Image: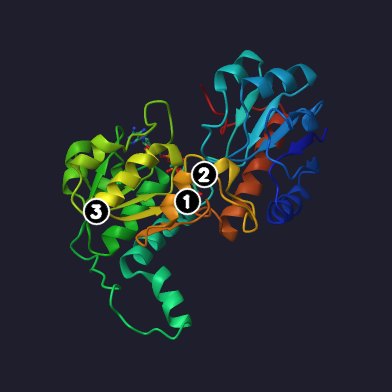
């Protein structure tokens, strides 16, 4: 029996990929453009399946509303699941599934794109050349070869980053409570977090956001890093204490900051706000630094990844429909 799926936070590109893959599954997909919040949850009343993305709020209030109206499955189109209240889902007997690996390379390659752009100031050079300014002052970069890169979290994405950075001839340090054999085989050295922070020229974050990792990088961690460190976060915004980062940028402790995620991104990202006044002063301050490069949660955004997200999401829903144990279920 095909299932009715309320798919939130959908853009034309999401619809195109999901519809194409759904031709083989035959579920009844209803696309909603808004983000799922307590205010928009009623759109999903009576749907057995909810399709959600990174900034959809699958919190207790939303689940308390939708479960009694028939919700049985939350199908996340993301790897991260920090936006779901798993305890509330379990209480209501709602299964949560995700897309654990769609294309770790999409995120890893974007991470490295931020590193390279910040180093060689591509974001500034682009504007200069368009204005007929071919001066090189202020564009001085460094060679990556021989530099020390610290990768925090070496799951699928972190591993792909270590692969690229060892290819660049960097020394790669890693911190992860569960070391990855493939990384060790490639010459990555696992060290304590403090050692990684102290020794790395570049620090990049690839672990999930959990209550334990919230604001993992704040003033204290910054204090341990090298002067002028390059810090990259393509994981989840709240891994960084953004106010502390602004302090670090002002003091020069942070030499380069590359972000694809921001702790208060839900009200900003994925939408065109070019006609609006941005009221978030912390975000606005970040934009004033020449050595900060921000992208709006686009690291995942490749054709390969969107195809894989649609494929796994629909396979997850079909497995649930057949009553099978889903290998992509999120366990509490
Ligand atoms: P994964 O589950 O394969 O790897 C996560 C790794 O982090 C694991 O090896 C785990 O042991 C480690 N870890 C957990 N807590 C840690 C801690 N406190 N310190 C150090 N390591 C820790 O996950 P994957 O696929 O590599 O994704 C990583 C994160 O990337 C996701 O949780 C998600 O937040 C983010 N992401 C961002 C995207 C974007 O478009 N910007 C797209 C996809 C994922």
Q: Give residue 136's position: percent from left, percent from top.
A: 30, 80
Residue 280 tag number: 2
Mark 2 to mark 3 CA distance (whole Å):
23 Å
Q: Is mark 1 within 8 Å of ligand 1?
A: no
Query: What crowding class fits label 1: few (fewer than 14 Cα within 10 Å), some (14-19), or many (20 or more)?
Result: few
Q: Residues within 10 Å of mark 3 (few under 14, many from 20)?
A: few
Q: Relative to residue 100, is residue 319 drawn left or right? A: right
In terms of image quarters, where does ligand 1 lie? top left
- Nearer-N-terminus badge (2/3): 3
Residue 244 on image: x %, y % = 33, 40
Q: Distance between the residues labelled 2 and 1?
A: 6 Å
* Residue at left offset 40%, top offset 56%: 111
Residue closer to the observer: 227 or 91: 227
- Looking at this view, is 11 or 222 the one in front? 222
User: Quick one: SS at disc 2?
Assistant: loop
- The residue that disc 1 covers is 284
In the image: residue 208, left or right of residue 225: right
- Examine the rendered structure and indicate whether residue 314 appears above or below residue 116: above
Residue under label 3: 252
Q: Are marks 2 and 1 in contact (CB under 8 Å)?
A: yes
Residue at image point 74% right, 22% down: 66
Picture coordinates of residue 81 (x, y %)? 53, 33
State the mark number for residue 11.
none
Helix, strand or loop at mark 3: loop
Residue 302 appears in the picture as rendered = yes
187 sits left or right of 235 in the view = left
Secondary structure of the residue carrying tag 1 is helix
- In depth, the one of 264 and 309 nearer the eye is 264
Quadrant assignment for the N terminus: top right
| Residue 317 vertical placement versus 289 (above, below) | above
| Quarter residue 123 falls in | bottom left
When the figure is inspected, residue 84 is found, relative to residue 117, above or below; the finding is above
């Amino acid at each position: 029996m095909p299932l009715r799926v309320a798919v939130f936070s959908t853009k034309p590109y999401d619809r195109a990929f999901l519809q194409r893959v759904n031709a083989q599954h035959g579920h009844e997909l209803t696309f909603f453009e808004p983000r799922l919040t307590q205010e928009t949850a009623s759109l999903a009343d009576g749907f057995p399946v909810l399709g959600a993305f990174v900034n959809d709020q699958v919190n207790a209030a939303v689940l308390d509303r939708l479960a009694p109206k028939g919700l049985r499955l939350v199908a996340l189109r993301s790897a991260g699941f920090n936006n779901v209240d798993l305890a509330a889902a379990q209480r209501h007997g709602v299964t949560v599934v995700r897309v654990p690996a769609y294309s770790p390379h999409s995120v890893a390659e974007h991470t490295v794109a931020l590193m390279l752009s910040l180093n060689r100031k591509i974001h500034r050079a682009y504007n200069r050349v368009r204005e007929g300014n071919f001066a090189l002052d202020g564009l001085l970069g460094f060679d990556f070869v021989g530099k020390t890169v610290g990768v925090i979290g070496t799951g699928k994405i972190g591993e792909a980053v270590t692969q690229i950075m060892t290819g660049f001839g960097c020394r790669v340090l890693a911190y992860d409570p569960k070391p990855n054999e493939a990384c060790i085989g490639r010459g990555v050295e696992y060290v304590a977090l403090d050692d990684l922070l102290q020794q790395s020229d570049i620090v990049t974050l690839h672990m999930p956001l959990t209550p334990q990792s919230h604001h993992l990088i704040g003033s204290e961690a910054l204090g341990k890093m090298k002067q002028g460190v390059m810090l990259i976060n393509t994981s989840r915004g709240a891994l960084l204490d953004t106010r502390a980062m602004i302090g670090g940028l002002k003091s020069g402790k942070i030499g380069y900051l590359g972000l694809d995620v921001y702790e208060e991104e839900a009200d900003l990202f994925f939408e065109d706000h070019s006609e609006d006044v941005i009221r978030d002063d912390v975000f606005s301050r970040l934009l004033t630094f020449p050595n900060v490069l921000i992208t709006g949660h686009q690291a995942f955004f490749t054709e390969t990844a969107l195809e894989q997200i649609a494929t796994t999401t629909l396979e997850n829903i079909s497995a649930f429909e057949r009553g099978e144990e889903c290998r992509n279920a999120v366990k509490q």
